[in-house]
Image (cartoon, rainbow, N blue to C red):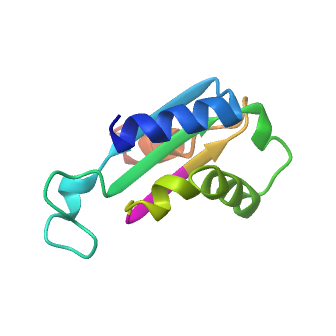
Amino acid sequence: MTMRAQIETLLAQSFSPEHLEVIDESEKHHGHAGWREGGETHFRVRIVADAFAGKNRLARHRAVNACLKGPLDAGVHALAIEARAPGEADPRDAARRVNSPT
């Protein structure tokens, strides 16, 4: 099983998300610290789950990091986390509105 698949499985089992994306961004970090041939070192997680309702950003990140302790210990060098509760606005939508031509 790939590291990406392990991350997806763990997050799905722990949080039952309504939305989950696990993106391998390793190639963006080619030549930087922690990068290795074959990738699977740098990931971005976008997750929307009821478990994050009422929790601040730090608590959400701690929950995801705790869930992914195994993969992090096994060689994942970097993990970017975008965790939201259902119904919360996606901050990328605001950035798109600001950057879109009018």
- Is 78 one of the magenta-colored residues? yes
- Residue 29 at what x, y percent from top left? 22, 64
Q: How many marks?
A: 0
Q: Residue at left 21%, top 57%?
A: 28
In-image side of 84 versus 93 (left or right)? right
Please tell me whether residue 66 is drawn above or below residue 21 in the rendered image.
Answer: below
Q: Residue at left 51%, top 41%?
A: 46
Q: Residue at left 37%, top 44%?
A: 3
Q: Nearer the viewer, residue 54 or 101?
A: 54
In-image side of 60 versus 21 (left or right)? right
- Residue 72 at what x, y percent from top left? 48, 60
Prevailing secondary structure of the magenta residues: strand
Please tell me whether residue 9 is drawn above or below residue 52 in the rendered image.
Answer: above
Q: Quadrant of residue 79?
A: bottom left
Q: Residue at left 25%, top 55%?
A: 26
Q: Quadrant of residue 13?
A: top right
Q: Residue furthest bottom?
A: 33
- Residue 93 at what x, y percent from top left? 51, 38
Q: Residue furthest right?
A: 54
In-image side of 58 versus 32 (left or right)? right
Q: Nearer the viewer, residue 77 or 97?
A: 77
Q: Quadrant of the C terminus?
A: top left
Which region is colored magenta?
A: 77-81
Q: Quadrant of the N terminus?
A: top left
- Residue 54 at what x, y percent from top left? 86, 46
- Is 102 one of the magenta-colored residues? no
